[in-house]
Structures are given as C-alpha cells and as structure tokens.
C-alpha cells in the first residue's frame, strides 16, 4: 500500500537560510557533521520522502542569515563556507506522520553554540580552562583557539577543531594575555 505521507521540502526564505537533515535521536548536529555530509539533507533539489503512517522522524535544523547576500564576505557558491551562517541556530524537530499530515511531538533550538544533540536540549558549546605553574600557563580547550595581546587583534593559534592544549610562557606576554575559543 502506498503511503500518503509524502514529504517535499523547499527550504529557502530570503535572506534566511534553512537547512534540514534526516537525523536520529542522540546524533550530534554541528557544522563539522554538516560539512562531512554525515546526514541526508532535505532540500528543494533532492528527492521527496515517503513516510509510513505513525512513523516518527527527527529532522536536524541549521539556520541563520544567508551569507550569500552579504556583499562584504566574498563567499561564492562552491566555497566551503558558502552555507556557513555567521551566527547560526542549531535545532531539531520530532515529527509523527499520519494520514498525509504530521504532528510536532517535540523540538529544541540552540543559539550561540557549536551544535545540538538530537532529542535533547543539550548544546555543544566550546570550553576553555587553564592551569598556571610558575611562568607557564597551559590552556585546555574544545575548539579552535585564538590569542591577543591587546584584546582587539586576534590570531588563530591552532586549527584544531576538536580542541587540545596550548602552552604559553606568560613571562614573555607581560601581565595581559587574552584567549578566546569564539570564532
């Protein structure tokens, strides 16, 4: 028997970009997972989806102001950052399909974060901690790390998206050293 629950998706509302993905409960939705094409993306150019009656589906949501309309950012189609929203929202919805319609069962959104765990309100947020021993400070962080001597001009000291440690000789930096894990 053919399902009446055909799902077709048109995702764009100028100038807001909205991308949705078929995900499972407990998956992590983040920019890194989106870039690696971990999840099937639902979009205007993709196939329609047929869902069975009573089927429960999780959709991951990635949305923000579309960078392609910012004349100053210089991103072009094909650039790896073309669909990377500068200040994104990550989220998910839990839908139940029934007789050609669907019901929203649950949802969550996260802002100022690096991602969300599907089916929860748990956000993926960057962390940083430090330990000082004598003239050495060791930073432990969960994302890319930036440093600055004046708090105005920032230099990326590592490209480690998964984090790591960074050691600083604080006797060479005077009394001020600014560190950030914010992009």
Image: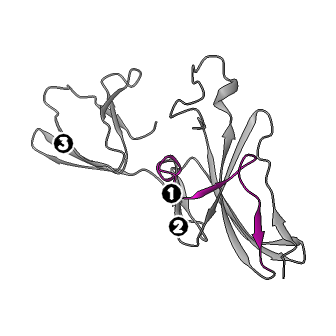
Q: Mark 1 or 2, which is nearer the eye? A: 1
Q: Which residues are magenta?
A: 32-52
Tag 1 near tag 2, CB within 8 Å: yes
Q: Decide which of 45, 10 is in the foreground and name it.
A: 45
Quadrant in the picture for the N terminus: bottom right
Q: Badge 2 is on which residue?
A: 27
Q: Looking at the picture, does residue 149 appear above or below residue 50?
A: above
Q: Earlier in the sequence, mark 3 or mark 2?
A: 2
- 138 vs 29: above or below: above
Q: Does 47 lie within the magenta span?
A: yes
The disc placed on residue 137 is 3
Q: Are marks 3 and 2 in contact (CB under 8 Å)?
A: no
Asked whether disc 3 touches disc 1, contact meaning CB atoms under 8 Å apart, the reply is no
Q: Residue at x 28, y 28 (%)?
A: 176
Q: Residue furthest left?
A: 134
Q: Nearer the viewer, mark 3 or mark 2?
A: 2
Q: Mark 1 vs mark 2: which is more N-terminal?
A: 2
Mark 3: secondary structure: strand
Residue drawn at x 57%, y 24% as measured from the top left: 75
Q: Is residue 157 left or right of residue 113?
A: left
Sequence order check, earlier mark of 3 and 1 = 1
- In the rendered image, which residue does mark 1 sit on? 38
The answer to which quarter of the image holds residue 177 is: top left
Q: Residues within 10 Å of mark 2 (few under 14, many from 20)?
A: some
Circle 1 packing at 10 Å, graded few (<14), some (14-19), many (20+), is: some
Structural distance between the alpha carbons of marks 3 and 1:
37 Å
């Amino acid at each position: 028997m053919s399902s009446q629950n055909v799902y077709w998706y048109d995702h764009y509302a100028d100038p807001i970009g909205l991308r949705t993905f078929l995900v499972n409960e407990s998956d992590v939705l983040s920019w890194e997972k989106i870039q690696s094409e971990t999840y099937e993306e639902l979009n205007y150019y993709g196939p329609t989806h047929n869902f069975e009656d009573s089927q429960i589906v999780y959709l991951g949501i990635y949305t923000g102001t579309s960078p392609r309309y910012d004349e100053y950012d210089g991103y072009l189609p094909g650039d790896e950052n073309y669909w990377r929203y500068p200040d994104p929202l990550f989220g998910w919805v839990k839908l139940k399909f029934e007789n050609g319609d669907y019901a929203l069962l649950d949802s969550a959104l996260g802002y100022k974060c690096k991602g969300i765990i599907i089916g929860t309100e748990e956000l993926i947020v960057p962390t940083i901690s430090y330990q000082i021993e004598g003239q050495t400070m060791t930073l432990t962080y969960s994302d890319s790390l930036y440093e600055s001597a004046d708090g105005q001009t920032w230099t990326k000291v590592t490209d480690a998206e998964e984090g790591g440690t960074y050691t600083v000789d604080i006797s060479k930096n005077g009394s001020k050293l600014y560190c950030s894990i914010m992009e």
